[in-house]
Amino acid sequence: MLPSPPSAFALLRSPRNLAIQFELATQTPSPDHPTVADLPQAVWRNKRYVLDEPLSRKGSKGRKSWIKRHGFFVVEIDTNNSPLSPYWACRLCDAKGQPEFFAAAATSSAADHLRRIFESSQGADTDPSTDETERPKRRRLQYSAVPRARVAMIRELSLGLLINTNVPFSFFSDTFFQQLAWQLDPHLSDQISWSRQSMSRLLDDMYKTKKDRVKQELSDALSKIHLRFDLWTSPNRHAVMAVMAHFLDRQGKHQSRLLALRRQLGCHSGENLAVTLGQVVREWKIEDRVGTVISDNASSNDTCLLNFYGDLDAEMSLVDIRARRMRCYGRILNLVARAFLYGEDLEAFEAVLFILRNKGDSQIFQQAESQVFNFLGRHEDDLRHWREKGLVGKLHNVVKFIRSSPQRSELFKKISRENDEAQEYLLAGESTAELEVVMNNDTRWNSTYLRSFERSSSRETLGRSWFIQRWRNGCPRPTC
């Protein structure tokens, strides 16, 4: 005789035990910003429950009672999805379809229930050091309507803000920020620990977590791990080596990861650089995955890579090492641009300009060759003259002249505003902020281009008007 099929009521009703309900509910993907209504739920006798762990309780360190091994903590929610009271549900009774609930404020009732089931003493099942029934009661932490996952996400974003903007850990302790956060979401603001100590601990934990994730990415990479390193001097005069890793991930996409900002001690010889680079590679456990290494054209970097690859593989030939040594294209391009602007020998170019500037004196002009060699031996401070660098130097001096005085800068802005107002039918144009003069420097490779060429067309008329007005007012002009 074939068994009768299950009735429609049996198919449509909820499972009788909580564990199956929670397991089925977790199979549904949760949204990016979950609320209490989006958490896995279970229904028993017309009451809805969610698991205790996903809910946020500020100051909670998690439940450590031994009864957690034999049941699960749940929280009842009302029709508005607000948390009510916490309970402990016996897993053994739930497996039989008759879950027993006990108030989670204390563990004594749940412990007595388990003793009756096991017919043994509590000491046989638990370590007294982890038994909360013997501990003094502490202040009860209230449940919030904010899921713990959302609180963790907000804290991680807050830490990213501190790092990206380089602001102190006390930023979130500011009274005005606290009031702003509370006005936006009072419940969320009350659940986030933004103190300096809390954010400092989060930084350490987040670093360890992210480091393990990057290690796994490096381990799963489809390609070799190609490195790039360079030296940098911090504002407090510390030498720092930055090491980047480039590789293809499991999906075949190019990835770049910063592996280290390591303090470089001692002289910057190739041998010392190789020691620091080797320490970074061993720390990330990629000794056997290293491909090419990119660095600038300094001779110390050649020595560094000879020692570095020699330590990784003693059998690697000199030809193989040179094949793995890549030159920094950005550095090469910058040197080419400087050669176009200043010539092949920058110091000789500056010295010749100084002599040609004084060519009215026939004696100096006739002795130009000897003056060049004598001038090259002088201190760099002696090279500060207005016309040392040709057209680019003139523009540099004009910008420096304007920026060296608040009154000149204000006059420049005033004329720029007047020019904007004179354009009656201008549909679009640069703002006065974009017309601010910008000083170039050696370390920012595109600053000369941005200052000299990108903005030159829009400032031609403006600059001419500025100098005409200066001269009419009897003000001194810069010596170009």
Image (cartoon, grey):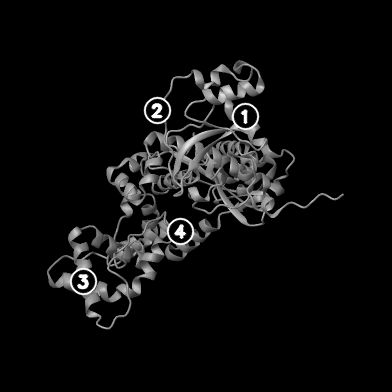
Between 320 and 232, which is closer to the camera in this rendering?
Answer: 232
Which residue lies most toward the bottom here? Answer: 425
Circle 1 SS class? helix
Q: Position of residue 233 (x, y in %)?
A: 43, 43
Above or below 340: residue 321: above
Circle 2 SS class? loop
Look at 54% across and 18% down and name the residue there. 129
Label disc, if present, on residue 415 of the rendered structure: 3
Number of numbered discs: 4
Q: Is residue 220 left or right of residue 257?
A: right
Label disc, if present, on residue 389 of the rendered structure: none
Number of residues whose C-alpha sits closer than 10 Å to that of mark 3, classed few (under 14), some (14–19) or many (20 or more): some
Quadrant in which residue 119 is drawn: top right
Q: Amino acid at mark 1?
A: His
Report the Cα–Cα distance between label 4 and label 1. Answer: 80 Å
Circle 3 SS class? helix
Above or below 88: residue 185: below
Report the Cα–Cα distance between label 2 and label 4. Answer: 75 Å
Label disc, if present, on residue 70 of the rendered structure: 1
Of the numbered discs 2 and 4, the one sitting upstream in the chain is 2
Q: Would residue 268 be seen by someone viewing this image from the given angle?
A: no
Of the numbered discs 4 and 1, the one sitting upstream in the chain is 1
Residue underneath mark 2: 139
Of the numbered discs 1 and 2, the one sitting upstream in the chain is 1
Q: Amino acid at mark 4?
A: Asp
